Image (tube, grey):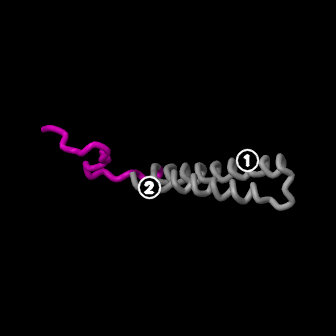
Amino acid sequence: MADLRKEGESARTDGKRPTPQTSILRFAGMGVQLAVAIGLGVVAGMKVDEHFQWEHPLGTALFGLLGLAAGMYQVLRALLS
């Protein structure tokens, strides 16, 4: 019988559920991805603060939030796919 799935649909239509270990690893990976994105944003912001010699850590805050937004985008994209 022909495969009638639309492009982009998940292959998990056979009724099999992922094992608990697979789910844990998937969510742990998302957490690590989010932490790395925020961490990279903060490090980049610290470099910007250092370069411009700002009195307040505006670059750290701004780039940290940008990292958070990028990380959340990745997590939500993974959850919705």
Q: Residue 36: within the magenta?
A: no
Total numbered labels placed on residues in the image: 2
Kindly identify which numbered label has been placed on residue 79.
2
Q: Where residue 36 sits: x, y (%)?
A: 64, 48
Tag 1 secondary structure: helix
Q: In the rendered structure, which amino acid carries the disc numbered 1? A: Ala
Tag 2 secondary structure: helix
Q: Residue at x 41, y 51 (%)?
A: 19
Q: Nearer the viewer, mark 2 or mark 1?
A: 1
Q: In the rendered structure, which amino acid carries the disc numbered 2? A: Leu
Q: Write down the region rendered in magenta.
A: 1-21
Q: Quadrant of residue 57?
A: bottom right
- State the residue in front, 62 or 6: 62
Apparent side of residue 18 relative to residue 64 in the rendered image (left or right) = left
Q: Residue at x 18, y 43 (%)?
A: 4
Determine the CA span between mark 2 and mark 1. Answer: 27 Å
> Mark 1 highlights which residue?
44
Kindly identify which numbered label has been placed on residue 21.
none
